[in-house]
Image: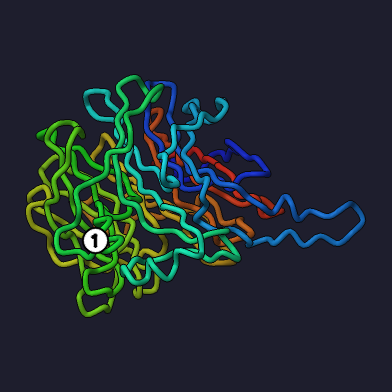
Amino acid sequence: MAFEAISHHRLYLESRYYCAFPAVCPLNASTLLVLFRRARDHRWFQRKPAGIAEDPGFDAVDHVDSRSHLCALRVRTDLTSVSNPVVLPMHPEAADQDASVLRLDTGRLLLAGFCWHPVPPTAAEPLKLRKAGLLGSPDTTGCLFVFWGGYTRISDDDGQSWTDHAFLPAVPGHRDAVEGLRPLFGGAVRGRPAELPDGTLALATYTNHPTGRRYASHLFCSSDHGASWRYVGPIAAAPDGAAGYAEPCLLALPDGRLLAFHRSVGLDDRLVLSVSPDAGGHWRAPEVVDVIGHPYDAILLSDGRVLLVYGHRHPPAAGVRARLWHPDHESLAQAPECVIRADSPSPDIGYPSAVATDAGEAAVIYYHCDPSGIRYLAGSRLRLD
């Protein structure tokens, strides 16, 4: 048997929305929960009458929007049946961004994400005086955005309801998001949390380095099933600015090792792997791996292998890829690679999330691009050799 994609599926497309950044976890033996970020896509306003050459602004998309929110889908494990999207309650002040999700051994669902606070252009100068980092442009995003923090939410009823946004603790020593008014709560979150063998939960975030140089990643832990969190320390940082480490995904191994898979900045889009031999107590120096893509999601299979999935945002083969890796028997760079998709007309795709389904199979959920430029949720079934 081969390590290969055996089918592709369109899960959700709506021309008025930009759908992206999914996360998946199992609800039961036959049903998956998919959370994703949905935002307005203004290109549908630009469509011209039939017979007139269209210019829909193929790549006119942005990753911030004042009405950005999270949606949930329930999907069969064979990806053949999908529910209608359900909108999660939004934060009353800020716009929700990426979702990351983990099903705990207790059955509880842990959602982690981050959000942006929209502000009018007239607030730019006062905010700059308070050393706030501003994202966006009034010409493209309608307003400016201030980072509002990383947060977690909990569901004990299979995602039917969720607790309010609970912001992570501030990152010690980091400058405020808005000086004197808003600490830097947690940092941005894009990457699956992990449940350690003793039941401790681990969550990785990323921020600008305190010196202002590129990105650094951080570890938070919870000893009460996600009800509260404490800052543990940095995972990877490069004070000299030579590299940045972003969008970290965590994976706990049964022997107590904790792995962090980073999107890199300044390293030609290569994977950076951080390894902790003691469940996050200490981290070895980051290792640059010759795997090209970002960001990453990793799941542990029952036979001890790791399924690693990642976006490949390099035309003309933009799409999604995967590797099957045994961390005790081979190097990650030498692990077999599967090209799941290489047919996207835009590099703005990917952000895959994986789950093991039937014996010898897995489902990978990601966002893709149709010929008109609409971003939609897609999924592929993999056969694992």
Q: Position of residue 177 (x, y in %)?
A: 30, 60
Q: Position of residue 326 (x, y in %)?
A: 25, 49
- Residue ID at (31%, 42%): 299
Say how many tags the image has: 1
Residue at label 1? 180
Residue 207, image quadrant: bottom left
Q: Is residue 254 above or below residue 294?
A: above
For residue 53, side relative to residue 154 (left or right): right
Asked which secondary structure carries label 1, the reply is loop
Q: Quadrant of the C terminus?
A: top left
Q: Is residue 156 above or below residue 383?
A: above
Figure coloring: rainbow
- Asked if one can make out residue 77 in the rendered structure from this viewpoint, the answer is yes
Using the image as rendered, state which of residue 6 and residue 140 is in the foreground: 140
For residue 364, side relative to residue 275 (left or right): right
- Residue ID at (33%, 49%): 191
- Asked if one can make out residue 290 in the rendered structure from this viewpoint, the answer is no
Q: Position of residue 35 (x, y in %)?
A: 44, 36
Using the image as rendered, state which of residue 195 and residue 383 is in the foreground: 195
Residue 342, image quadrant: bottom right
Using the image as rendered, state which of residue 330 and residue 59 is in the foreground: 59
Name the amino acid type tagged 1: Gly
- Residue ID at (33%, 33%): 164
Using the image as rendered, state which of residue 261 and residue 166 is in the foreground: 166
- Residue ID at (36%, 67%): 270
Q: Quadrant of the N terminus?
A: top left
The crowding category of the residue bearing disc 1, from other C-alpha atoms within 10 Å (few below 14, some 14 to 19, many at least 20), is few
Residue 46, image quadrant: bottom right
Q: Position of residue 179 (x, y in %)?
A: 26, 64
